[in-house]
Image: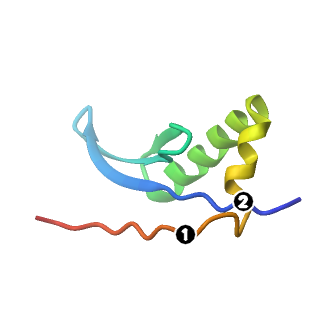
Amino acid sequence: MEKLSVNILVREEEMDDQKVFIVNNEDTGVADFGDTLNEAIENFKKSLHLYLETYPQKKELFIEGAKEPLLISRILV
């Protein structure tokens, strides 16, 4: 199985007075969330796998080494 390299954006938000983590990929529009960062990432992976099963031609976008990695960092203002 080939490895996929996916750029994600992670943010924290309040949902029903509770902090949640939201993970999304702008190339696909796939997003998911969780109460912890690890849970959000695992949920995102499941959602991305479902997306790629539906649109297998999109897998080419994420084959490891296919494009330069993007560094996303958090800036508090």
Which tag is nearer the camera, tag 2 or tag 1?
Answer: 1
The correct choice, above or below, for 6 with respect to 71 in the image is above
Within the image, what quadrant is residue 57 found in?
Answer: top right
- The residue identified by callout 2 is 4
Q: Residue at x 57, y 45 (%)?
A: 44
| Quadrant in which residue 36 is drawn | bottom left
The answer to whether 49 is drawn above or below residue 77 in the figure is above
Q: List x then y, in percent, for residue 28.
A: 56, 40
Query: What percent of the width, then of the height, locates residue 60?
Result: 75, 50
Q: Measured from the top left, where is residue 23 in percent x and y?
A: 46, 49
Residue found at x 58% / y 44%: 43
| Spatial CA span between label 2 and label 1 | 12 Å
Quick one: SS at disc 2?
A: loop
Side (left or right) of 54 relative to 13:
right
Q: In the rendering, which numbered label is found on residue 69?
A: 1
Relative side of 76 to 58, left or right: left
The residue lying furthest to the right in this view is: 1
